[in-house]
Image: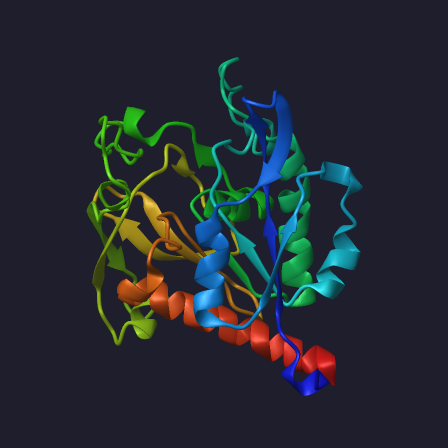
């Protein structure tokens, strides 16, 4: 293959899970995380196992043309941002925490484009020095942003657009949608950003004041969204634009590294 047509390599941190039938642990990421990337680029998605300090962070930054930070069942553990301890039954993934919280600043320093989704935006905030709310729905005046829990819901109902967001005037998100000031998004998260990191710029806020979109003050494309943008992004103007820009930045990095 011509080096000038080199496919961008996109790293996707995976999560640890228990296969109840086989009674063993495994690593995984959602199929939509991979397929959404392939909708926008002939790229090479690779899963990054949640192996904590065993992950060669600096070597990875030299291999990657983009970093997609997807959602996951486990929440970032609060000792990473000085928060109160989780209840004993809280699902955690220390291996993923150990990888992404070091990989994010390393990728930003190396100029690797980044797109954080749901847990991903929370990881970006914590990695750069911000804090999180443990349970948004327990805060006064906030909506319940968690996934709908009624029996028999279809996939379309789970990922349906549920609330509006306001886009920062003159911000990246607004510019990518032709100057629009509002959008509607799905909602499947329990935690949310409390204090944003100093290097984050707020791009979108929900109707009840929860931070829904950010960009990093960096020399490369680096954004995070609180909703699940990987669900049918081509049907959502803002998600479509964000994926387009992310993969464009990754392709530019791939071409530059091929020279």
Q: Residue at x 47, y 43 (%)?
A: 71
Height in image: 202 above or below 192?
below
How many marks the image carries: the answer is 0
The colour mode here is rainbow
Left or right of 219, for residue 118: left
Residue 157 image offset from top left, x and y in percent = 22, 42
Q: Is residue 5 above or below residue 236?
A: below
Counting from the top left corner in percent of width and height, residue 203 is at 36, 59
Residue closest to the eye, 26 or 257: 26
Q: Is residue 141 above or below residue 119?
A: above
| Residue at the image point whose x is 30% and y is 24% from the top | 138
Quadrant of the drawing holding the N terminus: bottom right
Near-viewer residue (47 or 22): 22
Q: Picture quarter containing residue 118?
A: top left
Residue located 22% across and 27% down the image: 150
The residue lying furthest to the front in this view is: 21
Q: Residue at x 56, y 34 (%)?
A: 81
Horizontally, is 148 left or right of 79 in the view? left
């Amino acid at each position: 293959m011509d080096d000038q047509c080199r496919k961008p390599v996109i790293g996707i941190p995976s999560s640890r899970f228990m296969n109840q039938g086989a009674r063993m642990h495994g690593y995984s990421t959602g199929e939509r995380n991979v397929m959404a990337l392939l909708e926008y680029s002939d790229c090479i998605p690779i899963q990054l196992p949640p192996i904590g300090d065993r992950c060669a962070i600096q070597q990875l930054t030299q291999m990657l043309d983009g970093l997609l930070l997807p959602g996951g069942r486990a929440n970032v553990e609060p000792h990473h941002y000085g928060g109160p301890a989780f209840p004993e039954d809280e699902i955690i993934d220390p291996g993923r925490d150990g990888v992404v919280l070091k990989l994010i600043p390393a990728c930003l320093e190396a100029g690797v484009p980044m797109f954080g989704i749901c847990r991903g935006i929370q990881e970006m905030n914590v990695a750069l020095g911000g804090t999180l709310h443990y349970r948004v729905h327990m805060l006064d005046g906030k909506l319940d942003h968690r996934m709908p829990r009624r029996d028999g819901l279809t996939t379309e109902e789970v990922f349906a657009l549920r609330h509006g967001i306001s886009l920062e005037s003159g911000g990246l998100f607004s510019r990518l949608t032709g100057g629009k000031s509002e959008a509607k998004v799905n909602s499947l998260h329990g935690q949310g950003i409390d204090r944003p990191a100093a290097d984050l710029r707020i791009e979108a806020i929900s109707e009840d004041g929860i931070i829904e979109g950010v960009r990093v003050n960096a020399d490369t494309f680096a954004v995070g969204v609180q909703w699940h943008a990987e669900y049918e992004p081509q049907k959502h103007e803002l998600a479509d634009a964000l994926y387009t820009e992310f993969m464009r930045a990754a392709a530019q990095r791939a071409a530059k590294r091929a020279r």
